[in-house]
Image: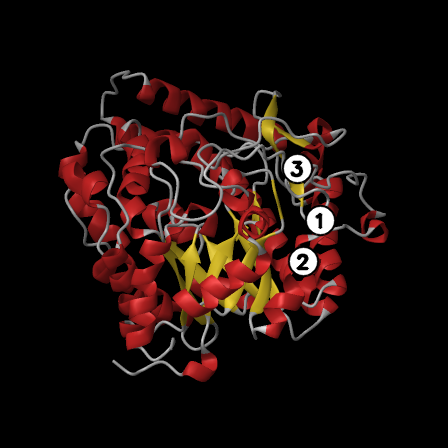
Amino acid sequence: MNRPDPGKKFVGIQISPISFIDEGVDQVLDTLQQRVGVNVLLIGTISWLGLKVGRRISHELEGWPDHGVQAPYTMKGGAYWNTHADYYANTPIKDFRSTDEELAGRDILELVIPAARARGMQIIPEMMEPLFKYAGHGSATAVQIANMPQYLEVDVYGRVAGEPCTSNPAYRRWWHALVEDQCRNYDIDGIMWCNERNSPLDRMIQGQAPGCFCEHCRREAIERGIDVERTRAAFRELHLYFQRARAGTPFVDGSLIEFLRVLLRNPEVLIWERFWLERSKDLDRELYGMVKWCNPKLSFGLNVWNRNHFNLFRKAQWPWDEQTMYSDWVKPITYQHQAGGVYVKELTDFHKSILRDFTPAEFTPVMYKILGLNEAPWDELVQRGMAPESYVGGQCRDTLRAVGNRVAVYMGIGVDAPRTRADQAHCTPEIVYQSVMATYEAGGHGVVFSPNYAGMNLSSLDGAASALRELGLHR
């Protein structure tokens, strides 16, 4: 293994604003720099999700970490910096500043940047879509933004759905403003952006009704020559298939053939799926351009969903070489101890519908072959998780092969990523150590400890520190 260049060190950690309040800015930065070897802070600056801006969200199952305040956080969510009104003139979404009592209106960027700069540390705000009511991410119970329901998606049956439509001009311009505000007004080093939106096909596989058919999506589709009403009819037929499959309805030729038969009878579904996908990617590309317009020296990194390498449709839809066109670096999410549970959850929806005629044990080796994985059998996957060398190292090698030398690859290392089951694999210092070593052995350019410092044990991070010392990246 070639030793990494300390002059190009990128050892990041995702961290929520509350940690700086709970423990003090100086204490947090000294701990991360001196004990762990971190030199990049990826701060959650706006969210209504505890996973991004709160304390540990799995404390009822896992207890509290060995640092910070060991008590629930009354997080309301919002922006954790003093937003500048001029940047929001072209969107009606204006009143979204966090009212969390613990933060008391403090600007997290103003609070942290001077102390971080004094220590030679980089600052990168990290933001993710969706922002609201994201199952499994510790969502705030309410979103106190006036008129937000007016920006929500509309499903194939005309019902208002649960997420804002990213094709809604007001909502989209709000995202533009959020990025520009931070890039122009703060001494930051870049932006990390994560797009975790489900496509129409995703939603049907998960048992939900597809969308979005709001007035803005319909208008854009018509401008592109898409017959919206024929498309809605096609989606209703395919959605009916998924409802029947999940209910156990027998099909003459099996569930997979029936899926293909209905899909091929309704090609409009694939046309709309592509239309939706391109609009979703357009937001990524727009934000990349916004960052570069504000300051070409700022980096734009993509925090890339693990579902993109666990789901065969998404793996085809989100090729790495394409993402190099609108990023300076990528962070594949590979939270190894949690990954077995995530994979089982993802594929369970397939085995309830398209793959219903195969047992998970039968099809898992085939799916591993398709996806380029080599992990534990289905019945052991949740309990064992995925192995650092084969999973973290394997995904790193695959990503490097795909991106070439066009962008840097910083692997997202899971450190006490929240578990959802008592029998799910635990994170350990050894797992973190092995994951860091696997990254650099594969040729990765850096690591990002994820998903949130407030949920990590310092004892787990000690495993990272040991690896970084061996690699010459930490004293």
Q: Earlier in the sequence, mark 1 or mark 2?
A: 1
- Residue 458's place in the image compared with 254, above or below, is below
What label sits on residue 220 in the rendered view? none
* Identity of the residue drawn at 33% across and 41% down: 342
User: Horizontal placement of 260 versus 160: left or right?
Assistant: left
- Residue 201's place in the image compared with 403, above or below, is above
- Mark 1: give few (<14), some (14-19) or many (20+) Cα within 10 Å: some
Q: Earlier in the sequence, mark 3 or mark 1?
A: 3
Number of marks drawn: 3
Q: Earlier in the sequence, mark 3 or mark 2?
A: 3
What label sits on residue 111 in the rendered view? 2
User: Horizontal placement of 249 versus 130: left or right?
Assistant: left
Q: Pointers 1 and 2 in contact (CB under 8 A)? A: yes
> In the image, what residue type sits under mark 1?
Arg
Does dot 3 land on a helix, a strand or a loop? loop
User: Horizontal placement of 187 versus 139: left or right?
Assistant: right
Marks 3 and 2, Cα distance to the nearest angstrom? Answer: 16 Å
- Mark 2: give few (<14), some (14-19) or many (20+) Cα within 10 Å: some
* Identity of the residue drawn at 51% across and 29% down: 210
